[in-house]
Amino acid sequence: MSVPGSSYAVATVTFTPPDEQNYNCTFKASLVIPKGSVKIKPQTLTFTISGRGHEPQLTVMCPSARSERGNAVLRFKRLRLGDSETLPLVIRNNGSIPVKIMLHLEDKHGAFFLKGRASTLRIFHTEDVEEDSVGNESKPPKKPFFLLHCGQSTEFDVIFKPTRARRLEGEICLFMGDMCSNKTLVELVGEGHKDEFTLDGLEEDTMEGNAESSLKKDIIDAVRMNHLQFGDCLVGKRCSRTFTITNHTRRKVMRFEWEADAPFQFSPKVGHLCPRRAKDITVTLKSDVPATFRRHLVKCKVTKINFELPQREVPDWDDRMCTVSWKSTTRKDPGDKFPKIEKVVEIDPEPAHTVVEESSQEAEVYLSAVAAHKQLKLKTMVVQFKDTQPSQTRTTTFKIHNAGKEALEYSWDYAADREPVNKPFSFTLMRRFLSDETVKHRRKLLRSYWWELEHPPKIVPKVRQRRPDRRLRLARLRQQRRDRQWRWDWIFHP
């Protein structure tokens, strides 16, 4: 290396550790003296270069589910063809060095899509940021990548839109650095269907043991939304949940019937579904004893039907529909002119129909609930305050514990039958902090205040006097004038 006078040169040292351990080396630079020149004392620059090899640590934060192979798994719902669902993918660099990552989506059926969010664009690069951009015009362009610094994370949206009525799968490959062998896999699982009716508004049973066991299988299933969670309910109190049943056909009318037993009640339990229509189903639980229901199975039988009359002339029907009428009775109370009228409720009969052969289907719904009593634990029965002066505030605390599984609602009521204990005010204590004049003034105020409490003022309603009529006032004035004139006449003419 040749260094011109009054200048400097830059030497580049490349460190490529093969393993995760410490490495040391010695850098030595000597001055080369040409022969025949002036004698110059030899000079040597020596220093140590050390480094440590680190393996990139890329972690998939979301999803948290892992398959038997140790890969992250994104499980999508079971969707109808044409519907879509979006789930997040969060990647974080937990290592101590920046990591370059590249993502590759492998999908044979074109049902999965990968989309970056706004925060992802800030870490997106199309060239090597570690090399100097000057003098690299002749180099071929490199593949775009994402650069994650230490502790930095990035988010993506993974979209599933089924194209076939079957189980669909794919995977996302995360390549770290320039090595294709160092990669992380994210498995994608979904399922499409063309069912003629669906149950919407249900959820996945996250507490189900089969949900975790399904991840340990070689073939992972899509998420099945067939669970209705009631949670904790009070004994003897009604607890309701609602979901929807939808008919997706264009011309076929369907009849549904729930095979439910006590203490669960379905409303409506039997009904008809017109084409492209939906109905809300309300499930009510009322248990008179403490009980636990874990994945209680309820089946729904669905069949296609044909009406005997044209479909336009047949109204929508379910077992909630009824006709209310008022009918006269022969009962009559003494003194009444007319007999009593009673309210009569009659359930509308089901329209005449025939069932289409081989059209019967079944749907399953699992119900989970816990019915229990309220349980309150209170150790403190008497709250004792310290002696408190007027205009002073004392605060004390105590704990109440909800020992039951149901949320406890409570409120405080003051016992009106108990009177507060009156304690005399201490003037001796007040004299220690106030002057004599102030004590006398406050004593006077307190006495007047106590006297007013013992002798409340009596409020007498004011009676508004009516003004006399104008004619009456004129008559009174004339009479007063006559009386005055009579007195004067009597004085001067006795």
Image (cartoon, grey):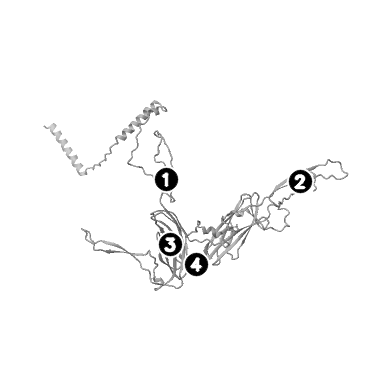
Say which residue label 2 marks.
27
Give the mark count.
4
Numbered badge on residue 101: none
* Above-or-below relation of 387 to 241: above
Within 10 angstroms of label 4, few (less than 14), some, or many (20 or more) residues?
Answer: few
Write down the quadrant of residue 472 in the picture.
top left
Q: Amino acid at mark 3?
A: Asp
Q: CA distance from mark 1 to mark 4?
A: 51 Å
* Between marks 1 and 4 in the image, the one whose residue lies nearer the viewer: 1
Residue 353: image x %, image y %? 40, 72
Q: Is residue 360 above or below residue 126?
A: below
Judge left or right: residue 167 versus residue 349: right
The residue under label 4 is 195
Q: Earlier in the sequence, mark 3 or mark 4?
A: 4
Q: Earlier in the sequence, mark 2 or mark 4?
A: 2
114 sits left or right of 33 in the view: left
Q: Nearer the viewer's eye, disc 3 or disc 4?
A: 4
